[in-house]
Image (cartoon, rainbow, N blue to C red):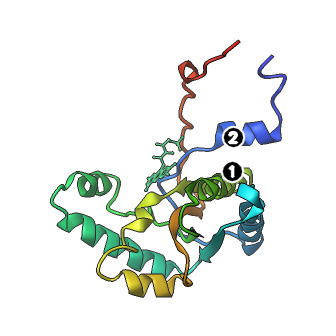
Amino acid sequence: MMNKMMNETLRTITERYSCRAYDGRLPEKEKLERIAVAAVQSPSAINRQPWLVNIITDKDLIDEMDAEGMRILAQAEDKAVYERFMERGGRLFYNAPCMFLVLKQPGTDLDCGIVCENIALAATALGLGNVICGMAAIPLSGENAETFKQKSGFPDGYEFGMSVLVGNAVGSGTPHEPDISKIHWIG
Ligand SMILES: Cc1cc2nc3c(=O)[nH]c(=O)nc-3n(C[C@H](O)[C@H](O)[C@H](O)COP(=O)(O)O)c2cc1C
């Protein structure tokens, strides 16, 4: 029954996983454009569309933000997060060549989250690795935050929502096993 119901959309959902290794090469512009349209096709409360989607394809800027984030984590009192990233290769953004930076108006986290999932699924459907990346908040909130906000195009009235890294995956990953014990039928 479950397999009979499978289609392209559901297959994409089952195939998505968080990719944490990229080859650093920028994917074709057409693919990034298609993902961007999927992002702004997301539903939002009262169709307010309280977001901006800034697509950073300047790898030097992404690498600069990566280094700044790692520097901040290295200085933190609790080194657990820093050590976890060092174990994963020492890169906050895994050598990704593209960051979809989702900016939001205050109080619209849910709308912003939906945009991120559309980006992740569109990237997966186009064969690109992707990971929703909250760690992008770190370089955007440290002592050099204003510089990075300016470089990544924050206008007044918008704050960091979330980021999604996109690129060509190195190797493959495994989607997490869905925990069906979380599903409850009432009635
Ligand atoms: C709001 C949010 C923030 C996340 N931030 C990060 C992050 O900064 N770095 C990272 O490697 N993964 C991040 N993830 C990915 C999760 O770790 C991942 O979705 C989870 O472990 C499940 O694995 P899967 O995506 O492969 O199914 C984030 C996911 C969400 C939804």
Q: Residues within 10 Å of mark 1 (few under 14, many from 20)?
A: many
Residue pointed to by mark 1? 121
Q: Which mark is residue 37?
A: none
Looking at the rendered structure, the secondary structure element under dot 2 is: helix
Q: Earlier in the sequence, mark 1 or mark 2?
A: 2
Give me the residue at 76% from left, 37% from top: 10
Q: Nearer the viewer, residue 44 or 28?
A: 44
Q: Nearer the viewer, residue 74 or 111?
A: 111
Amino acid under disc 1:
Leu
- Please tell me whether residue 80 is drawn above or below residue 181 in the rendered image: below
List x then y, in percent, for residue 96.
51, 66
Looking at the rendered structure, the secondary structure element under dot 1 is: helix
Callouts 1 and 2 close, C-beta under 8 Å: yes
Q: Is mark 2 within 8 Å of ligand 1?
A: no
Task: Report if residue 23 is visible in the image.
Answer: no
The image quarter containing residue 120 is: bottom right
**From the viewer's perspective, is 141 left or right of 179?**
left
Residue pointed to by mark 2? 13
- Please tell me whether residue 94 is drawn above or below residue 55 in the rendered image: above
List x then y, in percent, for residue 119.
67, 58
Q: Nearer the viewer, residue 49 or 140?
A: 49
Give me the residue at 53% from left, 34% from top: 176
Identify the image quadrant of the N terminus.
top right
Q: Residue furthest top?
A: 187
The image quarter containing residue 26 is: bottom right
Q: Residue furthest left?
A: 77
